Image: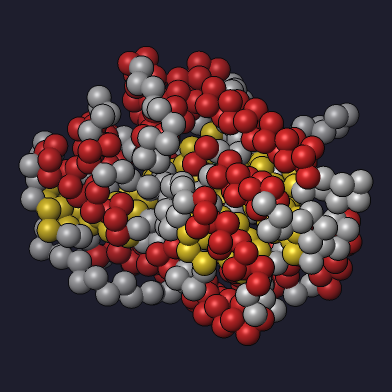
Amino acid sequence: MKTEKDYDFVVVSNRLPVDRVVPANGEAFWKHSPGGLVTALEPVMRASAGAWIGWAGQPDLEFEPFYSDGIQIVPVPLSASDIENYYEGFSNDSIWPLYHDVIASPSYHREWWESYVAVNQRFANAAVEIAAQGAVVWVQDYQLQLVPRMLRLARPDLTIGFFNHIPFPPYGIYSQLPWRTQIVEGLLGADVVGFQRVADASNFSRAVRRLTGYVTKYPNIEVPAYDGGAPRRVLAKAFPISIDSQSFEELARRPEIQARAREIRDGLGNPKTVMLGVDRLDYTKGIGHRLKAFGELLEEGRLTVEDVTLVQVASPSRERVQAYMQLRDEIELTVGRINGDFGTMSHTAISYHHHGYPREEMVALYLASDIMLVTALRDGMNLVAKEYVASRFDNDGVLILSEFTGASDELRRSLRINPHDIDGLKDAIVQAIDMPRVERQRRMRAMRNLVLRNNVDRWSAGFLDALRGVGQLGQPDDDDDPLGDLEWTVERIRHR
Ligand code: G6P
């Protein structure tokens, strides 16, 4: 068992990569959650004494650090009031709507901010305690934006990365935030601040210029010395995240998953076209816009329920935040209306599911669907779009993709739509239904090449390689993103 200050590579994220499962009449146990980030970082963790710091998703759950699949899991417990103020409040009712172009109105409360500062400090302290001399600490996402500076002040020996999984808004919106300067300074504690899109990185650089006056020359930002330290050059640029594409393809090729896909279509009454939406039930996803377009197409008789079914998976999310409760009511009312108006005894217009499903079932659904509808109003990346593409080893299926997602920067052979333009969305749906097979294949093949090449391993290797090259003035980024051997990258950073 390792002791304090022994870890060369530390990941800090709000949620841990394990879930606590409590069976009805059995003992609680931990289940590894197989997200893309975990899959990408596991080899680095194993090869370089890695630890993962985070919250276990329930109030006041205190437990000793433990190993799960080669990763040292280190808990940061949150009390009910931390959850209310730091997580549901500041993270998900101030920052989340603000960073998604104020689609919902953000609320700003000083108690939430105070809690955000205090909880960020606890995450930072946990990393300070366990990181070895010269270790690499990689902080994830908008819940922990103050951690990089807190780490830098306590441990100037560390190499610090930060990756923002969600958008970073234009200055005109960002400037609403009462604590806008503290957040920017918090992020600038890192050596590398990564964003999904070039637009996010330039929004950030502009916020830095406006709020601090530091010199920025994309992708670099010159940050003055902290007490006793040296001035630093921070790299702020885009590293578009991806998925473990190969494992999606591998699942899709399994006969039992293909059999399940056929079973799903049979269960829907074998319509000519199955359309699919898969989202966390979140107001950024444009689920209502999608339903409106589909409802109008049925109303106008351009589509019929005998021919087309929409499957909508809406996984439960942040259910105690008011805006999410309201959204659920609106969506479920609309689904009920459309089904009531257009359903027949044998065909339902929308097959709606308020659940999350295991990856195997999702891949079967991807294979069963002729059209994937991604209509987000704003989305950092949208990994579901990439999952659909990675799963379609048969080179079939049409992706309708909102231009307001990070994924649309890369997936240019999708049918790109503006979800606010309902007529345009309706036309794209009809175009997708009528698209000849050769064109579907041409588009899907091009997108698959990209998604299989730019997988999540390449993403993490690119980010860690950038971390190796920066941190001190005099080492400008040469922007060539070399992909080193992932497992050796952390070692190379420590000994640079
Ligand atoms: C987004 C965020 C993640 C977050 C996830 C689920 O993808 O970028 O940081 O973990 O949503 O949200 P939750 O609030 O349940 O963690």
The part of the image, by quadrant, that contains residue 131 is top left
Way the structure is coloured: secondary structure
Query: Could you tell whether 314 is left or right of 40 in the image?
Result: right
The quarter of the displayed image where residue 183 is located: top left
Tell me: residue 177, above or below residue 443.
Answer: above
Question: How many numbered dots are placed on residues in this image?
Answer: 0
Please state if 455 lies on the left or on the right of 27 as rendered: left
Q: Relative to the observer, which residue lies in front, 454 or 43?
A: 454
Is residue 229 visible in the rendered image? The answer is: no
Q: Residue at 47% across / 68% down in the picture?
A: 411
Percent position (x, y) of residue 64? 59, 33
Q: Nearer the viewer, residue 316 or 427?
A: 427
Q: Is residue 442 visible?
A: yes
Quadrant containing the C terminus in the rendered view: bottom left
Q: In the image, is 261 to the left or to the right of 36?
A: right
Position of 206 with respect to 66 (left or right) is: left
Q: Residue 213: horizontal and vertical position, in percent?
A: 7, 42
Measured as percent of width and height from the top left, residue 153 is found at 23, 36
Quick one: 175 or 244, which is closer to the camera? 175
Q: Residue at (15%, 65%) from the top-left corner?
A: 476
Placement of 494 over or under 117, stated as above or below: below
Residue, far right: 345
- Pinpoint residue 398: horizontal percent, then vertical percent: 61, 69
At 83% from the left and 58% from the top, the residue drawn is 306
Residue beneath the point at 22% across and 41% down = 171
| Quarter assignment of residue 184 | top left
